[in-house]
Amino acid sequence: MESEKRSVSPSPSIPPISREQALLETFFHALSQFAFDKAKDQVEKEKETKRLPLVYSTPWSSLLVTLSHLALAEKTYFSLPFIAKKFFRKDSVRDSFKTLITELKRIEETTHSSSSSTGSPLEGSYEAMAIMGSSSNVNYSDLSNMIDEICRRHNKGFHHPILDSLKSSFSFEVDILCNLLKAQCDMADWKFLSSLLHLHESHVKLSSWCQFLPSVELSASLTLKKSLFGSTPKKHLEAPFLYQWLGKLQDALVSKFTLYFYHILGRQTTPVDMKSLTARASIDYIGRITAFIRRSDAFNVCMLLDTHQLEPYQGHGYHLPHDVKEKPSGLGAFPAVFSFPGDRPVDHWPNIVSILLDKVQELNSMEKIVFFFDSGVQSTYFLTRVDPRMTLVVIFNSKRSEKDSYVTTFLTETATLLRNTKIFAMLKQGGRVKKTKLPTAPVTQAVTPTVSMVITENERSHDNNLE
């Protein structure tokens, strides 16, 4: 019997975690779920339970005070009020994070343990984007590179398992913002597949991030619609302003995508269905252009891409990796990104390209509308630059006034929407912005069949050419 008892070894028991470790785990988990008040209340409750002094008497009590301040700083950060002009002062959230880092380092020196604070690595980026809201000429590439560098520099800062949930929240924020900015850059260069993939990735991240929200009702309501051009939920929900803003930027970029790649998307469905799909986007560019043409009696609205020094350039839509195309020249170096109604007006194209080249400095300012009347063909042209390589054009087969307010307003508003400057200007409002329905990021499973059909179509075309 004794030998049998000796042969049965007890299973190793898992040592219970300490009260302090449990508190830290729940605290950082609450922060990752945007439950900033809950995180702060947990710390305050711990201080009351142990009746700890309010000032720094022990490392643990000092840490509790610092954590309480951290919860408040995180809440402030996610509402983005520091971008408003009145917050550019000594008591900004950036200085709050700097103070927290200093205090954590002091506690670390006292206890000889390691502490980490993610602080506000993206705060400067949001301030830069807010400034973009008042600028017509925005360099998205520099901003995207800045976010990449922040990600590389801070990704290894979450070295302790307790910070895993906070690391997930940070990763979601950085990945979403990075993909959205890259989508903007790729669309400006008319790169179909990479733009689509970045939008899809940002949508997946937004959808996953919303699952971290503590409220079951809120998370369920934020389940994003599985449609390429889905609309926002009908319920009025509140989430951190930063999350709302990222969703609005996603929606705006999806709307822009429907315009820049309208023709290739239209090949996958009927004109009626395509009209219905684009109408569900947050900005119905097709509807705006159609209404403008009808009311102004414009002959055509189109957009040109300047392909000079654009490497590599392969043309509209998806292309097989091994496809090699000759670099376009002459009028071919200025392809039509879109044209309504119908195909690009071939007879007007030499005139448009000539005006574009002659007025390049005015167009590069991104603020002016170039006017030109050709008495020889009795046609009027209005041009404005919307992206560094993209020029929006309105054509009339009659003489129109250079100061036609309806035309100039349409061009100015459309250019502003396509640059997303209003979205970036929203950052200046921060948490003071009016509560609205939470935006969705409407690129989901519909993306896959869209890409699949486009790829299949191009592969068939390629095979036919080989034959």
Image (cartoon, rainbow, N blue to C red):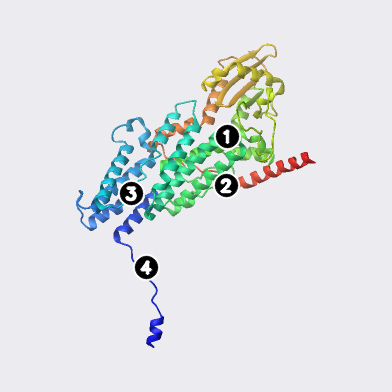
Q: Are marks 3 and 1 in contact (CB under 8 Å)?
A: no
Circle 2 residue? 444
Q: Whole-percent x and y of residue 269?
A: 68, 41
In the rendered structure, the answer to whether residue 207 lies left or right of residue 24 reads: right
Q: Nearer the viewer, mark 2 or mark 4?
A: 4
Q: Is residue 199 positioned above or below 132 on the image?
A: below
Circle 4 residue? 14
The foreground one among 179 and 156 is: 156
Q: Nearer the viewer, mark 4 or mark 1?
A: 4
Residue 319 shows up from this direction:
yes
Q: Secondary structure at mark 1?
A: helix
The foreground one among 181 and 237 is: 181
Report, in whole angstroms, how far the alpha carbon at label 4 lies from the one at label 3.
Answer: 32 Å
Earlier-in-chain disc, 4 versus 1: 4
Q: Whole-percent x and y of residue 358?
A: 60, 16
How many marks the image carries: the answer is 4
Outermost residue toward the right in this view: 467
Circle 3 residue? 37
Residue 163 bears which disc, if any? none
Q: Nearer the viewer, mark 4 or mark 3?
A: 4
Q: Label 2 crowding class (10 Å Cα cut-off): few <14, some 14-19, many 20+?
A: many
Q: Residue at x 67, y 39 (%)?
A: 319
Q: Secondary structure at mark 2?
A: loop
Residue 282 shows up from this direction:
no
Q: Residue at x 28, y 49 (%)?
A: 108
Report, in whole angstroms, how far the alpha carbon at label 4 lies from the one at label 1.
Answer: 53 Å
In the rendered structure, the answer to whether residue 1 lies left or right of residue 102 reads: right
Q: Residue at x 27, y 52 (%)?
A: 112
